[in-house]
C-alpha cells in the first residue's frame, strides 16, 4: 500500500491520485448514553485505506449539529496520529451530525489518470467539458476541497433527532438523508438528496460503501431531476456514501476545475 506523503501540503496534492473516498469515522455511531467519542478521518478504500494525516490548519470547519445547536469543535481536534483525530464530547441524548470542511488544495494529473478518475467518480461536468473542448489528452488541473458528515446517535431516536439528521448543514455539496438511518422502515431503504449550493443536484453519482468491507461500493445511483436517490440495505452495519461534483474555472485560473468531495457516514440497525 502506497503511503500518503507526510508533509501536509504534499498529502493534499497526492490524495486524488491515490484514493478518492474520504469520511469521518467515529469510534461508534450509536451510544446508549452521553460520551466522549474518539473520531478519525480516513481516505481511500480497501488496501489503500489510510488515515488522512493532515495538520489542523487544513481543517477550516469542524462542528456538530446537536441538541445544543451548532457547536464549534475545532479545539477538540488532535490530528496527531495517536489513534484518533479528535475527541468529541457529546454531553446530551439525541442525534449529532459531525461536520468537516477542508481548505483547498491543488492537483495536476496526467491525462490517462485524470480521465480514469473522473469516469470512476462520475464527475459529469469535467467529463463533458473535456470532451466538448477536445481536451481528453490534456493533463487534469483542479483545485479541490472536502466536506464530510457523520451521524452519531446518543440514546433513543426522537423527533428532534430525526429533524436534525434530515436537515442540511449548509455545505457547498452535501448528502442529506430523507430519514434517520436508524429508522429505515419495513423496506430497509434510505432516500437521500444531494444539494449543491443549496439546490438539488441532478445527475450526480452517489456511491454506498460498507465500511467493514470497503474494497468497492455495494451500490451506486445517479440522482434524479430533484437530486434524489434511494438505497436499500440488506444487513445492518457501518456505511459511507460519497459524491463528487465540479465547476469549470476561467481560462486564467490556477486550475481548470473547482472540485468538491462530499461524504456521509452512519450506521444502520
Image (cartoon, helix red, strand yellow):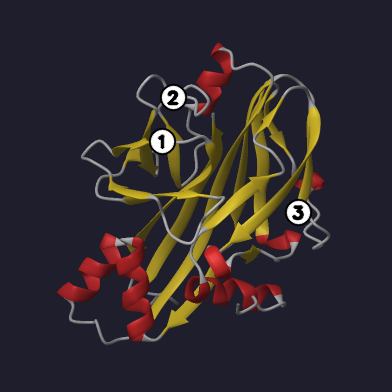
Q: Is residue 10 above or below residue 67?
A: below
Q: Residue at left 33%, top 84%?
A: 112
Q: Name the residue at 41% across, 20% down.
A: 185
Q: In what element is the residue under mark 1?
A: loop
Q: Residues within 10 Å of mark 3 (few under 14, many from 20)?
A: many
Q: Earlier in the sequence, mark 3 or mark 1?
A: 3
Considering the numbered disc 3 on the image, is that residue within a helix, a strand or a loop? loop
Q: 197 or 263, which is in the foreground?
A: 263
Can residue 48 be seen from the camera position used here?
yes
When asked about the image quadrant of residue 216, the answer is: bottom left
Return the residue at label 1: 233
User: What is the x, y in percent for residue 47?
Assistant: 56, 69
Give me the C-alpha separation between circle 2 and circle 3.
30 Å
Q: Quadrant of the C terminus?
A: top right
| Residue 136 in which image quadrant | bottom left
Kind of element beneath mark 2: loop
What residue does disc 3 label?
85
User: With respect to residue 95, does 52 lie above or below?
Assistant: below
Question: Does the CB distance between marks 1 and 2 fall below 8 Å?
Answer: yes
Tell me where residue 179 appears, x and y as whole percent: 44, 24
Q: Which quadrant is home to the N terminus?
A: bottom right
Q: Say which of marks 1 and 2 sits in front.
A: 1
Nearest to the eye among marks 3 and 1: give it.
1
232 sits to left or right of 152: left
Q: What separation in Å lies between label 3 and label 1 (alpha carbons)? A: 29 Å
Q: Which residue is mark 2?
A: 184
**For residue 234, side relative to residue 4 (left or right):** left
Amino acid at each position: 500500500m502506497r503511503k500518503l506523503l507526510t508533509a501536509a501540503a504534499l498529502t493534499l496534492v497526492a490524495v486524488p491520485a491515490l484514493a478518492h473516498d474520504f469520511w469521518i469515522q467515529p469510534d461508534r455511531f450509536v451510544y446508549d448514553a452521553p460520551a466522549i467519542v474518539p473520531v478519525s478521518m480516513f481516505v481511500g478504500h480497501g488496501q489503500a485505506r489510510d488515515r488522512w494525516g493532515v495538520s489542523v490548519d487544513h481543517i477550516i470547519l469542524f462542528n456538530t449539529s446537536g441538541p445544543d445547536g451548532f457547536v464549534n469543535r475545532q479545539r477538540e481536534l488532535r490530528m496527531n496520529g495517536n489513534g484518533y483525530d479528535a475527541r468529541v464530547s457529546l454531553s446530551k441524548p439525541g442525534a449529532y451530525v459531525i461536520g468537516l470542511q477542508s481548505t483547498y488544495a491543488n492537483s495536476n494529473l496526467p491525462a490517462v489518470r485524470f480521465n480514469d478518475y473522473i469516469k470512476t467518480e462520475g464527475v459529469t461536468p469535467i467529463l463533458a467539458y473535456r470532451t466538448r473542448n477536445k481536451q481528453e489528452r490534456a493533463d487534469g488541473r483542479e483545485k479541490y476541497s472536502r466536506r464530510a458528515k457523520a451521524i452519531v446517535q446518543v440514546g433513543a431516536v426522537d423527533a428532534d433527532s430525526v429533524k436534525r439528521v434530515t436537515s442540511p448543514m449548509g455545505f457547498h455539496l452535501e448528502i442529506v438523508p430523507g430519514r434517520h438511518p436508524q429508522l429505515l422502515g419495513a423496506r430497509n431503504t434510505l432516500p437521500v438528496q444531494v444539494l449543491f449550493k443549496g439546490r438539488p443536484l441532478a445527475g450526480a453519482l452517489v456511491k454506498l460503501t460498507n465500511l467493514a468491507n470497503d474494497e468497492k461500493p455495494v451500490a451506486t445511483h445517479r440522482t434524479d431531476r430533484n437530486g434524489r436517490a434511494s438505497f436499500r440495505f440488506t444487513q445492518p452495519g457501518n456505511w459511507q456514501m460519497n459524491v463528487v461534483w465540479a465547476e469549470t474555472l476561467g481560462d486564467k485560473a490556477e486550475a481548470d476545475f473547482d472540485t468538491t468531495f462530499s461524504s456521509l457516514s452512519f450506521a444502520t440497525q
